[in-house]
Image: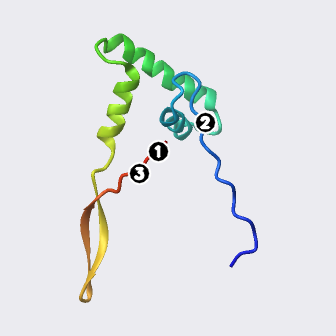
Amino acid sequence: MSRRKSAVKRESLPDPVFNDIVVAKFINKMMYDGKKATSQAIFYGALDELKTKVTEEEPLMVFKKALENTKPQIEVRSRRVGGATYQVPVDVRVVCIS
């Protein structure tokens, strides 16, 4: 067993505009070469443009619905039967982000 202490898990801070952790994680994944301000400007600009085009729904709700639609619903797991290994489709486990 390792003698080193385990790292302390840091909580993600929400984004400053919508106060949402999912948006903050998306902006961080979008970030390239550490340019977070550029990533935020692109994301918030896209939501502002979405606000002008879609008037019946909030832009944040449209973003979250698009995120739900792009999530995979099944994944394949390896299952050994006899001497052969088969790829068996199973439902994706639901993991809470917040």
How far across and how far down the image is residue 95, in percent?
Answer: 41, 51
Name the quadrant of the N terminus.
bottom right
Secondary structure of residue under mark 3: loop
- Which SS class for mark 2? loop
Q: Are marks 3 and 1 in contact (CB under 8 Å)?
A: yes
Q: Which residue is mark 1?
A: 97
| Separation (CA) of disc 3 from disc 1 | 6 Å
Q: Amino acid at mark 3?
A: Val
Hey, which quadrant is residue 35 in on the image?
A: top right
Task: Classify mark 1: helix, strand or loop.
Answer: loop
Residue type for callout 2 = Leu
Which amino acid type is shown beneath numbered disc 1?
Answer: Ile
Mark 2 vs 3, N-terminal side: 2
For disc 2, the neighbor class at 10 Å (few under 14, some 14 to 19, many from 20) is few
Disc number at residue 13? 2
Question: Which residue appears at 31% of the width and 68% of the height?
Answer: 77
* In the depicted structure, whether residue 79 falls above or below residue 49: below
Q: Quadrant of residue 8?
A: bottom right
Q: Is residue 39 above or below residue 56?
A: below
* Front residue of this view, candidates 72 and 12: 12
Q: In this figure, which residue is indicated by the disc labeled 3?
A: 95
